[in-house]
Structures are given as C-alpha cells and as structure tokens.
Image (cartoon, helix red, strand yellow):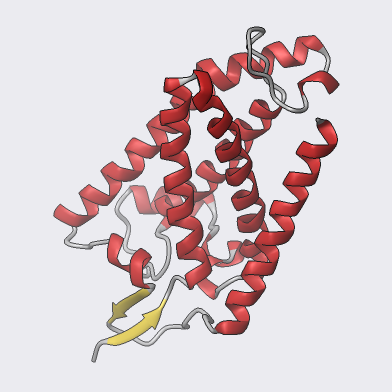
C-alpha cells in the first residue's frame, strides 16, 4: 500500500526556490556589472536573509528539514558511496544531506566575503570600511576568484545528481520539492505544514531580513 507523506513543508520549498532564483540573479548581475551591481548587492542581502532563516528552520522547521534528522555520520556516507544497503531515504539521502550543508556553508561564506569586499573601483561591501585592508583583500580575492566558481561547481553537481537519479535510479527528486509530498511504500512521519508553521516561518524570515537590513543601514 502506497502512503503519501508530506516531506517538504511549504517554507522549506519557498526557501529552496527563492535561493535558486536569487543565485541565478547573482550570477547574471555579477557578470553584467555596472548599474546591475545595485541588484547584485540586494540579491546578496536577500540570500543572507534566506540563509539566516534556514539556519533557524533547521532546528524548528518541518521534521525532514531539521538538521538532527538529515545530518548523518561520515561512516554512513561512506557506506552509501560503497553501495551498501541502507534504509531508503525519505528526505535527503546521505549525499543530498552533505550537499545541503556544503551549499549553506559556502553560500554563507560567499555572502560574508561580499560584505567586506572592495574592488577599489566602484563597488565595495557595506562592512569593508570596518575591516583591515589585508582581510578586505583576502575576502575580495576569495569572493571573485574562488568562491563563485566553487558555487558554480556545486550547482552543476546538484543538477547532475538530479539527472542521475532520474535516469539511472528512476527516482524523480524535483516534484516533491514543488508540492512537498512523496509516495512511499511504508508510512513515515509527515512534516508539520499548517498555517501556524507557515506563520512561524514568515516571522523568522522577517526577523532575519530585518537584522540584515539593520546591519547594512548601520554600516552605511
């Protein structure tokens, strides 16, 4: 008997697709430069707000979105890579969990270095005047010459994994991130996804966005 389980709550799905859109926007505005850099910074602030939300949501959000559920031991990841039989994944599989953590950490690093970067021409991060020049130079170099390309590679790896699972393992990972549900052979815990949960998510995001806006205004 097939059991329909809510795996990804609405706030997690909105976070995911908002992050995708902002990431694409950052790439476009960063390549265009000039006046588009105004939007590059705005999108960076939005991503920081989203990341702050996700960090909190990893502790209070839907069941399968919580870090304690999908963050697993290195040994389990190694067994997964070796093809050992493991309990079927409901949320993120071991590699998916590792990918999520990598994306969150590296995006946070990219945004943080952007806040203190300075191209010494036109554009400078709002916190660049508060950091010693040595560290501004290091942050600028990482942000422009390393970090963005690491994120490009992760994005391509993520897309490649989706394609691999679709064609090689006959598992389409995308629909669940649209509507939130998975059809499973056995009943599993469903993520709570009611109006109270969604209101909580909205409050958390608003607080994070307010914190980012306050930081930028204070630095300016």
**As displayed, is residue 197 above or below residue 150?**
below
Farthest residue to the bottom: give it: 1
**As displayed, is residue 30 above or below residue 6?**
above
Along the line of sight, the residue nearer the viewer: 73 or 110: 110
Q: Could you tell me if residue 168 is visible in this image?
A: no
Kindly identify the residue that appears in the image at 59 percent across and 45 percent down. 46
Quadrant position of the N terminus in the picture: bottom left
Along the line of sight, the residue nearer the viewer: 88 or 48: 48
Q: x, y (%) of residue 76? A: 46, 55
Q: x, y (%) of residue 181? A: 35, 76
Left or right side of 23 for 168: left
Left or right side of 86 for 126: right
Q: Hey, which quadrant is residue 84 in on the image?
A: bottom left
Kindly identify the residue that appears in the image at 55 percent across and 39 percent down. 43
Q: Hey, which quadrant is residue 204 in on the image?
A: bottom right
The mark tally for this picture is: 0
Q: x, y (%) of residue 156? A: 33, 36
**As displayed, is residue 168 above or below residue 1?**
above
Kindly identify the residue that appears in the image at 63 percent across and 41 percent down. 45
Q: x, y (%) of residue 209? A: 69, 52
Farthest residue to the front: give it: 35
Q: Could you tell me if residue 109 is visible in this image?
A: yes
């Amino acid at each position: 008997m097939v059991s329909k389980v809510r795996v990804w709550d609405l706030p997690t799905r909105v976070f995911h697709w908002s992050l995708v859109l902002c990431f694409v926007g950052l790439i476009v505005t960063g390549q265009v430069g000039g006046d588009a850099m105004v939007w590059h910074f705005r999108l960076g602030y939005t991503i920081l707000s989203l990341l702050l939300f996700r960090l909190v949501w990893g502790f209070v959000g839907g069941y399968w979105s919580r870090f304690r559920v999908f963050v697993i031991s290195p040994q389990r990841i190694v067994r997964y890579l070796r093809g050992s039989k493991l309990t079927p994944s409901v949320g993120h599989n071991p590699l998916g969990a590792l990918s999520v953590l990598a994306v969150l950490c590296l995006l946070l690093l990219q945004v943080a270095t952007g806040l203190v970067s300075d191209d010494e021409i036109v554009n400078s991060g709002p916190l660049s005047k508060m950091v010693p020049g040595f560290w501004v130079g290091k942050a600028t170099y990482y942000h422009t010459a390393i970090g963005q390309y690491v994120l490009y590679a992760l994005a391509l790896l993520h897309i490649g994994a989706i394609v691999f699972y679709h064609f090689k393992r006959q598992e389409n990972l995308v629909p669940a991130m649209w509507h939130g549900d998975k059809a499973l052979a056995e009943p599993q815990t469903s993520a709570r996804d009611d109006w109270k949960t969604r209101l909580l998510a909205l409050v958390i995001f608003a607080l994070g966005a307010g914190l980012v806006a306050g930081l930028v205004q204070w630095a300016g």
